[in-house]
Amino acid sequence: MSTILHIDSSARLDRSVTRRMGRQFIDYWLELRPRDVVIYRDVGRNPPPIVSQAWIAAAFTREADRTDEQSEVLFVSDELISELERSQIIVIGAPMYNYGMPASLKAWFDMVIRVGRTFAFNAEEKTWPLSPVLTGKTLVILSSRGEFGFEPGGIREHMNHLETHIRTCAHYLGVTQTHFICTEYQEFGDERHRRSVADAEAAIGRLARSLCHCGP
Amino acid sequence: MSTILHIDSSARLDRSVTRRMGRQFIDYWLELRPRDVVIYRDVGRNPPPIVSQAWIAAAFTREADRTDEQSEVLFVSDELISELERSQIIVIGAPMYNYGMPASLKAWFDMVIRVGRTFAFNAEEKTWPLSPVLTGKTLVILSSRGEFGFEPGGIREHMNHLETHIRTCAHYLGVTQTHFICTEYQEFGDERHRRSVADAEAAIGRLARSLCHCGP
């Protein structure tokens, strides 16, 4: 049995392309593995708190030394990290907003990438001091873009700060394998967009089937 | 007389490197141009709201057709855009959190990059439909990084999703000239960090003096 952490970050609750993509993936998955568990976290609807000075101070205080107030400040972070720890597959619906992640999704990453919990810091190591605590997770990024050409070699490759950024952060969540599927041309609402949505749906089906058969 | 929009986005209120860098820049500037106006916006302390479905619907409704509720939803966005419009120089204190912007700063960008206000969308244009409404602004990014090697050719160049992302977004704020100064090695707290802070301070002084003499 596997556990899937399914995160939605679109601000749109209706007519969201990434929400639909996520539901498609989960539907395909559960059809093949109905006993698997899905943890659903909707950061688009309920954004996590944004890191504060008190949060940083609490995160850098050893657990045994924390005041009750400090433990309270870390409550949401603890909860989100626990969801991550329990999951082998992470599915993130991540629309591109202004060429990067929605602020709500960045707030989620800032809550879960935490010293002593998801990464270790080795002060003796003068070049690469950070290493992930977790490992072996598979990440599926389901993204939508208003424009197009963000792929390697595309006309907007240099403006792609979403997929690249999530891939960098994912390492610190214990992700060792990442898959990326996206739709494009949303702002144009034309035939190119419709074709892109249809292609993405087919790719989601193929990916869900292929990952299903790799699982435990 | 010039107007400077000074934005702080560090979650740290004390001991923040980027807050100190911003104060240094403003101090140098006002010493030379004491009559200039500084608009200060602290998104680290008071993060702007995160874009919601209601916000998107309101932003995409023509001003004349908006309900009172929709105008209300755009209130913070209107205020932040007005601060941007009034400014010729934008100074952003932007610490690197998990290899990108703090969520609070992304929330700010998502509030100010708005159709019909800061960018125009031309549906007839099938490749580059977005163009900035504002122009001629100078952006100064003052950043701090826990690690190092994020510059072109550096060992972490591919993990730099802060400067690159801000430069992409800045185009839609009417920025035509960007300057970037950063400190590195903060997590190590060693001699390399102290040298980096000293170098940045000198660079901030030089930049403030040079930009001061270009202004109106």
Image (cartoon, coloured by chain):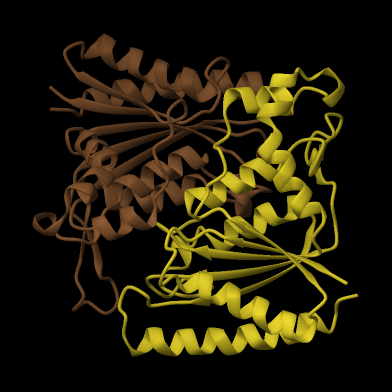
Chain colours: A brown, B yellow
In percent of the image, x 81 and y 73: which residue is there? B36
User: On screen, A23 above or below A215?
Assistant: above
Quarter occupied by residue B97: bottom left
Quadrant (top left/top right/bottom left/bottom right) for the C terminus of chain B: bottom right
Residue B161, position in %: x, y? 50, 58
In percent of the image, x 68 and y 48: which residue is there? A155
Residue situated in front as seen by the camera: B91 or A176: B91
Residue B68, position in %: x, y? 74, 20
**Left or right, residue B107 beside residue B97:** right
Quadrant (top left/top right/bottom left/bottom right) for the N terminus of chain B: bottom right
Residue situated in front as seen by the camera: B200 or B11: B11
| Residue B177 visible in the displayed image | yes
User: On screen, B37 above or below A214?
Assistant: below
**Left or right, residue A97 beside residue B174:** left
Residue A153, position in %: x, y? 61, 51
**Left or right, residue B29 beside residue B110:** right
Residue situated in front as seen by the camera: A70 or B17: A70
Residue B101, position in %: x, y? 50, 55
In percent of the image, x 79 and y 41: which residue is there? B128
Quarter occupied by residue A190: top right
Residue situated in front as seen by the camera: A16 or A117: A117
Residue sticking out furthest to the right: B216
In percent of the image, x 63 and y 48: which residue is there? B109
